[in-house]
């Protein structure tokens, strides 16, 4: 059967119209069934527990179940790759932080996704200031004393981390670059660097506040500075990096929500609105503050600007320190 040119044009126009209407049609009535949120961390770890607390309220706002999918393999790269390839319909999202969403692009020679272009930023959710703690045997009471000692003994002071390229490692690399000192890295694999710090086997760490709060309370480690814009409620006596005279030290963890690139704008707007409400819900906000964090929701454009600044900062830290994972 021969198709005339006029019929072909009409068919093509109809297909074009159908494609053009698809995003709007997909957004109508969203969400109509459960939403999956990938978490690039093992169940029960800090990121997973934080994400579950937020997603419980997010589910209330969406009025649909939110199903957490834990996928910690390959430093979060596997989860990021799966979400990057997912249908951009608002039903597959990822809650990711500094490593998978920013640093891994510079730590690994090859990854199967582009964190800058394969995702639509929805919103920053949570900021987690870091704290620099030392073992009392080091004999320093302030950042100024620590810097002076490190300059007298370059490379002699050790710091621990959960491994090369982790936030704890990169935070100290950023601190060394900001202060011009040299410390020696002791990377741990399956062992716990926090207990070794408390025992004095390593002398220093920069960490999120929650993992070291018990040691601080017990007096087995001493906090010297927090990397935060203002003092942290659970550590009110500890100065910020600016107050301590090193404003260029800016190392903090964070969590944000992303969708696959191409997700319709009306769906992104709905997700942004609902996650914004979720993170400031009293039960969520109070939980964040109890562990030294705070809610940080904003517009997708604000999140995109934040990501650009994080890429500029951490790409330089990683390149200057020559850190790589493959």
Image (cartoon, grey):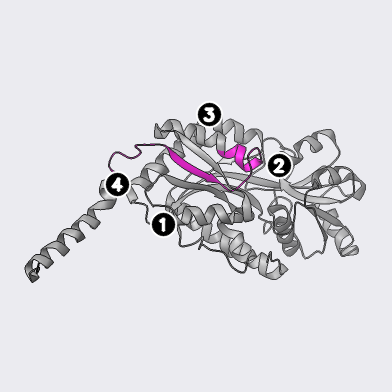
Instruction: Work out whether residue 177 or residue 166 is closer to the camera in this orientation and state it.
Output: 166
* Labelled pair 3, 4 in contact (Cβ < 8 Å): no
Mark 3 or 1 closer to N-term? 1
Asked which quadrant contains residue 51, the reply is top right
Q: Is residue 320 visible?
A: yes
Name the residue rendered at 39%, 46% in the picture.
Answer: 90
Residue denoted by label 3: 282
Mark 2 or 1 closer to N-term? 2
Q: CA distance from mark 3 to mark 4?
A: 32 Å
> Residue 210: horizontal and vertical position, in percent?
70, 39
Question: Residue 26's mark?
Answer: 4
Secondary structure at numbered mark 2: helix
Secondary structure at numbered mark 3: helix
Can residue 28 be found in the magenta stretch?
yes
Question: Residue 209's mark?
Answer: 2
Q: CA distance from mark 4 to mark 2?
A: 42 Å
User: How crowded is the residue under tag 1: few (<14 C-alpha within 10 Å), some, or many (20+)?
Assistant: some
> Residue 250: horizontal and vertical position, in percent?
66, 55
């Amino acid at each position: 059967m021969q198709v005339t040119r006029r019929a072909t044009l009409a068919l093509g126009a109809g297909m074009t119209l159908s494609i053009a209407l698809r995003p709007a049609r997909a957004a109508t009535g969203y969400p109509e069934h459960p939403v999956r949120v990938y978490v690039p961390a093992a169940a029960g770890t800090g990121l997973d527990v934080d994400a579950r607390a937020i997603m419980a309220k997010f589910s209330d706002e969406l009025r649909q179940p939110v199903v957490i999918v834990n996928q910690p393999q390959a430093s979060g790269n596997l989860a990021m790759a799966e979400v990057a390839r997912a249908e951009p319909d608002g039903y597959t999202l990822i809650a990711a932080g500094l490593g998978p969403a920013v640093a891994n692009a510079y730590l690994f020679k090859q990854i199967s996704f582009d964190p800058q272009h394969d995702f639509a930023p929805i919103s920053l959710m949570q900021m987690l200031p870091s704290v620099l703690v030392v073992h009392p045997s080091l004999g320093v009471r302030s950042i100024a004393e620590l810097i002076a000692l490190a300059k007298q003994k370059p490379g002699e002071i050790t710091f621990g981390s959960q491994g090369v390229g982790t936030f704890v490692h990169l935070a100290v690399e950023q601190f060394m670059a900001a202060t011009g000192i040299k410390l020696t890295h002791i990377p741990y694999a399956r062992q716990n660097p926090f207990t070794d710090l408390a025992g004095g086997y390593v002398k220093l760490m920069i960490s999120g506040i929650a993992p070291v709060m018990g040691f601080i309370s017990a007096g087995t480690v001493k906090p010297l500075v927090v990397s935060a814009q203002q003092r942290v409620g659970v550590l009110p006596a500890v100065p910020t990096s600016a107050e301590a005279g090193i404003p260029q030290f800016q190392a903090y963890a964070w969590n944000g929500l992303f969708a696959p690139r191409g997700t319709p704008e009306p769906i992104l707007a709905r997700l942004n609105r609902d996650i914004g409400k979720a993170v400031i819900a009293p039960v969520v906000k109070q939980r964040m503050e109890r562990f030294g964090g705070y809610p940080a929701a904003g517009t997708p454009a604000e999140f995109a600007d934040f990501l650009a600044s994080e890429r500029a900062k951490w790409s330089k830290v990683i390149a200057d320190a020559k850190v790589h994972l493959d």
